[in-house]
Image (spheres, rainbow, N blue to C red):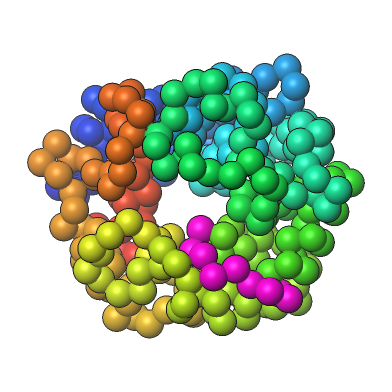
């Protein structure tokens, strides 16, 4: 085991929460992907949604669309399909969506619990983020649902006709492009992302990173990602080199924002450490 990976494993075992530890074990130690599915199920509430600070910066127990995006993402990372669980969240999403199928990050209930300061300023209005990513991840699961069909078509039309110039929303679009069953639509989404991304807020095309934002590695965490052709080899190599340098002496990677408390900070560090080590190994750096 490479030194960087060994140090990251030590950090995960000593600091990360169970979800990220299990994902690490699935990737590197042959643990069954079902173990990740079991953990995500534990976050489900009786209304069908996912809660309990699944996104570590928002500490509420109530179901939130943002948590569903996070949980479905974990299932995809593990390569695990649980159509029953994925379908069951759609009724909750439908109940909090607008007439076009768009959902907000949160319901009002989220603001009754501690959260990171950057989320306090967020809107309760439904939007492309997180709806588009949720749709993509539900398509990965093979879900068939009336709400999903409506939301997917809404997101597709909005992105193709007027792509957002904001990196997080475009990263959500990348998830839809990756997994939408209609591959012609996937290519149209990719074209829209390619046109908007160079001018998008919070996009950092080249290393070094001097402020918060998303890099090409967020859009292409693996060499076979649909968005990989949007970036030069120099862009990818530069960000991989910088990512490798960011590993701290404790074996983990830092976060670049203020978490609402120590538990949140460690949970997020576990998350970004998992992402870092996976990207470095996928590209053959470690």
Residue 22, percent from left and from top:
43, 31
Return the residue nearer the eye: 49 or 108. 108
Magenta-drawn stretch contains 106: no
Q: Is residue 261 left or right of residue 108?
A: left
User: Splitting the image into 4 quarters, where does residue 237 fall?
Assistant: bottom left
Residue 185, percent from left and from top:
75, 73
Residue with the most extreme right position: 146
Q: Residue at x 67, y 52 (%)?
A: 127
The residues colored magenta run 160-168
Q: Is residue 249 left or right of residue 37?
A: left
Residue 255, percent from left and from top:
28, 44
Is residue 255 depicted above or below 85 in this figure? below
Q: Is residue 232 visible?
A: yes
Q: Residue at x 57, y 60 (%)?
A: 169
Return the residue nearer the eye: 164 or 246. 164
Number of labels in the image equals 0
Q: Residue at x 77, y 69 (%)?
A: 157
Residue with the most extreme left position: 249
Residue 39, percent from left and from top:
54, 25
Is residue 142 depicted above or below 223 in this figure? above
Return the residue nearer the eye: 28 or 250. 250
Quadrant in which the C terminus appears: bottom left
User: Splitting the image into 4 quarters, where does residue 266 fall?
Assistant: top left
Is residue 173 depicted above or below 140 in this figure? below
Q: Residue at x 41, y 63 (%)?
A: 202
Q: Is residue 140 visible?
A: no
Q: Is residue 5 left or right of residue 100?
A: left
Is residue 131 depicted above or below 6 in this figure? below
């Amino acid at each position: 085991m490479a030194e960087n990976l060994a140090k990251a494993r030590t950090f995960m075992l000593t600091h990360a929460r169970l979800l990220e530890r299990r994902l690490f074990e699935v990737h590197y130690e042959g643990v069954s992907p079902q173990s990740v599915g079991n953990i995500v199920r534990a976050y489900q509430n009786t209304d069908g949604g996912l809660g309990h600070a699944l996104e570590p910066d928002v500490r509420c127990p109530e179901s939130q669309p943002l948590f569903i995006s996070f949980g479905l993402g974990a299932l995809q990372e593990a390569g695990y399909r649980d159509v029953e669980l994925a379908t069951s969240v759609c009724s909750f999403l439908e109940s909090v969506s607008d007439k076009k199928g768009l959902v907000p990050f949160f319901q009002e209930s989220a603001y009754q619990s501690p959260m990171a300061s950057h989320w306090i300023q967020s809107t309760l209005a439904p939007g492309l983020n997180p709806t588009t990513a949720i749709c993509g991840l539900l398509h990965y699961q093979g879900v068939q649902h009336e709400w999903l069909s409506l939301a997917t078509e809404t997101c597709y039309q909005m992105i193709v006709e007027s792509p957002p110039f904001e990196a997080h929303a475009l990263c959500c679009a990348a998830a839809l492009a990756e997994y939408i069953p209609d591959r012609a639509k996937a290519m149209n989404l990719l074209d829209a992302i390619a046109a908007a991304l160079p001018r998008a807020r919070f996009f950092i095309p080249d290393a070094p990173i001097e402020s918060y934002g998303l890099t090409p590695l967020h859009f292409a965490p693996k060499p076979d990602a649909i968005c990989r052709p949007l970036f030069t080899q120099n862009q990818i190599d530069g960000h991989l080199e910088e990512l490798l340098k960011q590993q701290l002496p404790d074996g983990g990677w830092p976060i670049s924002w203020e978490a609402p408390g120590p538990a949140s900070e460690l949970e997020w560090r576990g998350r970004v450490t998992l992402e870092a080590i996976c990207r470095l190994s996928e590209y053959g750096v470690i």
